[in-house]
Image: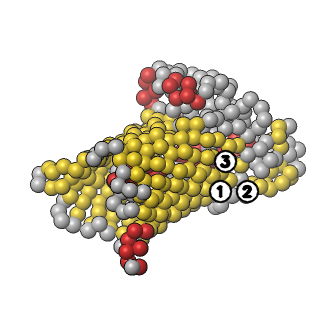
Amino acid sequence: MKKITLILTAILCLGIIIPQTKAQTTSTTGANTITTGVPFLTIAPDSRAGAMGDAGVATSPDVNSQHWNPAKYAFAESEMGIALSYTPWLRNLVSDINLAYLVGYKRLDENQTMSASLRYFSLGDISFMSEYGDPTGQQSPNEFAVDMGYTRLLSDNFSGAVALRYIRSDLTGGQMVGSTETHAGSSYAADVAFYYQNQIRMNRKNSTISAGINISNIGSKISYTDGETKDFIPTNLKLGVAYKTEMDKYNTVTFAFDINKLLVPTPTTASTDIVTGSTSSKSPIAGIFSSFSDAPGGMSEEFKEINFSAGAEYWYNKQFALRAGYYYEDASKGNRKFFTAGAGLKMNVFALDFSYLLPVAQNNPLANTLRFTLSFDLEAFNKQRK
């Protein structure tokens, strides 16, 4: 058995679909995929948005808004809520990789809301071998991120939010990778988000138009060694719009559309290896600004770095939901293309949602991905108890 290297393990287990073992430029195969450290932060953690093609920055507020757009909490109907999501990850490859997500929020007054979440990613059990094939130990790599957010209503239709995040990634348990000593990596990051919502009357029906923006994971690079090699974390820009309208007294439908772009430098040389990580010396802030114009292929390649999400949601009597969506990523940037579907059941106190992912390409590691979310309306629970 070959030795398991640090970043190769992360890439395999996190399911970034890159058939090459190096980041290649457009001069070789046409693929120039952007890779970052801790990509688990970009995985959709909940079932609702996961069933709508990963569209969630401008949809109506729910308890899981912390990941998509924490500014939505200002318009949440309930005073307090909590949810737990679970995703068996890459089940077509392995059986012990899982993502768990715990999130909650509490309204402080009419204008202010606090929120928090914990994301835990378990990569199962991995046996490490020396370059001579001798076992050197077994570890259970894991990563987690914990964050807190503050949301404020800025006007009747507009809100803003900030969130602070601590990230820890332990992929080797301190194992030696070749002759290099490794350790857990850590980073700090922040999100800045805004949300607009306006209720209108159209064709004698009540409707809501909304828009959102979330710049997430603005923070320091992460490193797993004491050397100079440091990887960008997945700083991300998400923009979205949504339209919700009632069909009649009992039926409503929502249409949502998001665009998404990583705000990290595009690889420019074929020598950037996934074992050694990114060689860019840019700071995270410089990387954000340069990410709009640094692609080797010019603006045409920059546009290929934008991913698209489209989703629809139908509710009957605010109790039963059906959802569907589609996610698109250019073939030269990872080639993730998949359809999603899901359903939800909402009672007085709790709600249960699930989603299912169906990739366009065959033999895709993401095939048959399921997500489950259990949510609790704590305000309704307190009223019912009284």
Give, as a three-letter code, the residue at label 1: Ser
Which of the marked residues, 1 or 2, is nearer the chain's N terminus?
A: 1
Dot 1 and dot 2 residues touching (CB under 8 Å): yes
Amino acid type shown at disc 3: Arg
Q: Which mark is residue 185?
A: none
Q: Residue at x 81, y 47 (%)?
A: 175
Secondary element at tag 3:
strand
State the separation of the CA atoms marked 1 and 2: 8 Å
Q: Earlier in the sequence, mark 3 or mark 1?
A: 1
Residue 174 left/right relative to 149: right
Q: Secondary structure at mark 2?
A: loop
Give the class, few, some or many, for how many residues have Cα within 10 Å of label 3's Cα (few <14, many ≥20): some
Of circles 3 and 2, the one toward us is: 3
The residues tagged by marks 3 and 1 sit, at their Cα atoms, a distance apart of: 12 Å
Marks 3 and 2, how far apart in space? 14 Å
Residue with the mark numbered 3: 168
Residue 117 at least partly seen = yes
Residue at x 70%, y 37% (from the top left corner) = 223
Q: Residue at x 46, y 58 (%)?
A: 105
The picture places residue 166, in percent across and down from the top left corner, at 61, 46
Foreground mark, 3 or 1? 3
Residue at the spot 28% in from the left edge and 53% down from the top edge:
254
- Return the residue at label 1: 122
Quadrant of the rendering where the C terminus is positioned: bottom left
Under mark 2, the amino acid is Ser
